[in-house]
Image (spheres, coloured by chain):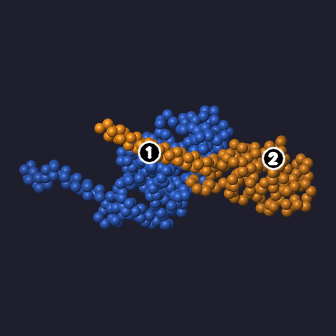
Chain colours: A blue, B orange
């Protein structure tokens, strides 16, 4: 057809501005959940940040999550949002003279905190170091696998989230999905995290881990006692890390963390830094205490010490 | 005018005196309370050990009470290597300096013997170990030595030394570590 005829065609009458508006509208509509998606999908889409939610809102969210997880894992899952206990600041002690690098703590944590088994995530990383070189992180080996530990001439240093008092990770989060609670635990709101992994880059201890794929958590191994900010099953694309077993320690009376209980040689100690009678205060006052990367001024709550 | 000013000063002075007395007594009471409280809640410093609730000693089944066999037997305090019974126990713990009857009481085998001659039960064996290993004993009493289970803000669960350490061969044997983490390049 002639140029004039093709220009008269209604399709060409549309201005560029009109077309862009139309495309934007279609993309916006596509981004929303489907019309007949279950109500939970709409609710989770519009769920607010944990710290902004009102109490009734939070209870609705917890109930919805409990229902979801119970259906997925075929057991009665509890999701709690226990607040911090007043007058408590958690501290952790790790006895470098006793740790033998057996990794019982690593797997105890995996069991308690519902980490994905495949792809594998471990919140605790045990480093094998040379006694001659001391704490030389460039020579640290995390993939050691001898037939028996401890190996001669080596000592072992497990590393996990140190729940820093001045955490670099919370400063860099672009959406404030991670923050430090009043009892010192640095937590992540998994529904608010966008998965940019900036916090992982900021952490000097390599303590944060990312869910690259949908977590593979077998229903039989799932721990049904969970906390919203702690060990509830995580979705794909969010960052997770040690939370000092927030689901255990915030109870009254508070239980020890899973790693403390798993350690067969008693190298791990935990307690309230604000209680002058606690074990952790005794350690800080009486033992030789060492802080990893102290020069970075992160002020961690994780104190490595030498008991003898 | 002068009288008013002097009266005003008198009233103010009395008021200041009363207030300072009140504050001073309140502070003194507070300090006393703190002192009293601190003494009451202090760590056990007295010579008498407070009772530690420990689980039962991990005896081999049937071995206790020892007096079942030893009541009839005549004690032989000569230091020697045992040939007839208890041959499975090889002492690897100060074996150059001590032998069985330095810790086990000669006349009553159901009891352990402290250095000062005092007899204690097997449920208090930490006192025996604490004689030489005082620093570990001190740490254990506070909860810093040994496996920690129970509540961090409540009742601590204590274990006896012998629940982890074999008293005749206490050094831990190396054990097999659990598997290392998967290397990132191997995660599919």
Q: Which residue is mark 1?
A: B18
- Across and down, in percent, residue A222 comes to 52, 60
- Across and down, in percent, residue B126 comes to 73, 51
Give the residue furthest to the left: A4
Q: Give the residue drawn at x 36%, y 59%.
A: A54
Q: Is residue A223 above or below residue A295?
A: below
Q: Give the residue drawn at x 41%, y 43%.
A: B14
Q: Which residue is mark 2?
A: B115
Residue count near mark 2 (Cα–Cα under 10 Å), binned few <14, some 14–19, many ≥20: few
The answer for how far apart the CA atoms under marks 2 and 1 are is 63 Å
Q: Give the residue drawn at x 60%, y 50%.
A: B41
Q: How many marks?
A: 2
Secondary element at image label 2: loop
Task: Please state which of residues A16 and B117 is positioned toward the viewer in this rendering.
Answer: B117
- Across and down, in percent, residue A67 comes to 43, 66
Q: Is residue A46 left or right of residue A257?
A: left
- Chain at tag 1: B
Q: Quarter holding the N terminus of chain B?
A: top left
């Amino acid at each position: 057809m002639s140029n004039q005829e093709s220009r008269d065609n209604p399709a060409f009458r549309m201005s560029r501005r009109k077309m862009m508006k139309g495309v934007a509208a279609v993309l916006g509509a596509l981004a929303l959940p489907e019309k007949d998606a279950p109500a939970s999908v709409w609710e989770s889409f519009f769920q607010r940040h944990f710290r902004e939610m009102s109490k009734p809102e939070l209870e609705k969210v917890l109930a919805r999550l409990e229902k979801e997880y119970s259906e997925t894992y075929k057991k009665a899952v509890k999701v709690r949002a226990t607040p911090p206990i007043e007058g408590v600041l958690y501290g952790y002690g790790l006895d470098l003279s006793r740790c033998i690098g057996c990794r019982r703590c690593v797997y105890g944590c995996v069991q308690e905190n519902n980490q994905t088994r495949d792809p594998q995530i471990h919140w605790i990383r045990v480093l094998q170091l040379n006694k001659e070189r001391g704490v030389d992180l460039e020579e640290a080996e995390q993939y050691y696998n001898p037939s028996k530990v401890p190996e001669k001439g080596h000592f072992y240093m497990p590393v996990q989230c140190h729940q820093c008092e001045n955490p670099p990770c919370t400063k860099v989060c672009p959406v404030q999905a991670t923050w430090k609670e009043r009892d010192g635990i640095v937590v992540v709101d998994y529904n608010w995290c966008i998965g940019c992994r900036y916090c992982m880059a900021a952490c000097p201890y390599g303590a944060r881990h990312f869910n690259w794929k949908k977590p593979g958590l077998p229903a039989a191994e799932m721990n049904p006692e969970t906390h919203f900010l702690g060990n509830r099953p995580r979705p794909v694309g969010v960052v997770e890390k040690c939370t000092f077993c927030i689901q255990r320690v915030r109870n009254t009376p508070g239980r020890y963390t899973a790693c403390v209980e798993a350690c067969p040689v008693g190298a791990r100690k935990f307690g309230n830094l604000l209680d002058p009678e606690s074990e952790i205060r005794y350690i800080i006052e009486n033992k030789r205490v060492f802080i990893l990367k102290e020069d970075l001024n992160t002020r961690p709550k994780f104190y490595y010490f030498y008991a003898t | 005018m002068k009288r008013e000013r002097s009266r005003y000063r008198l009233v103010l002075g009395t008021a200041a005196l009363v207030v300072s007395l009140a504050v001073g007594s309140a502070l003194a009471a507070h300090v006393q309370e703190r002192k009293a409280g601190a003494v009451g809640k202090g760590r056990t410093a007295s010579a008498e050990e407070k009772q530690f609730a420990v689980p039962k000693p991990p005896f081999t089944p049937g071995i206790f009470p020892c007096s079942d066999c030893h009541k009839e037997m005549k004690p032989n305090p000569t230091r020697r290597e045992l040939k007839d019974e208890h041959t499975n126990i090889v002492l690897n713990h100060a074996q150059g300096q001590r032998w069985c009857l330095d810790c086990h009481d000669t006349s009553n085998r159901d009891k352990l013997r402290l250095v000062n001659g005092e007899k204690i039960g097997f449920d208090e064996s930490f006192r025996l170990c604490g004689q030489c290993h005082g620093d570990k004993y001190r740490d254990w009493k506070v909860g810093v030595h040994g496996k920690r289970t129970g509540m961090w803000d409540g009742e601590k669960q204590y274990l006896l030394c012998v629940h982890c350490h074999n008293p005749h061969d206490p050094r831990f044997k190396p054990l097999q570590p659990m598997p290392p983490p998967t290397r990132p390049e191997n995660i599919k």
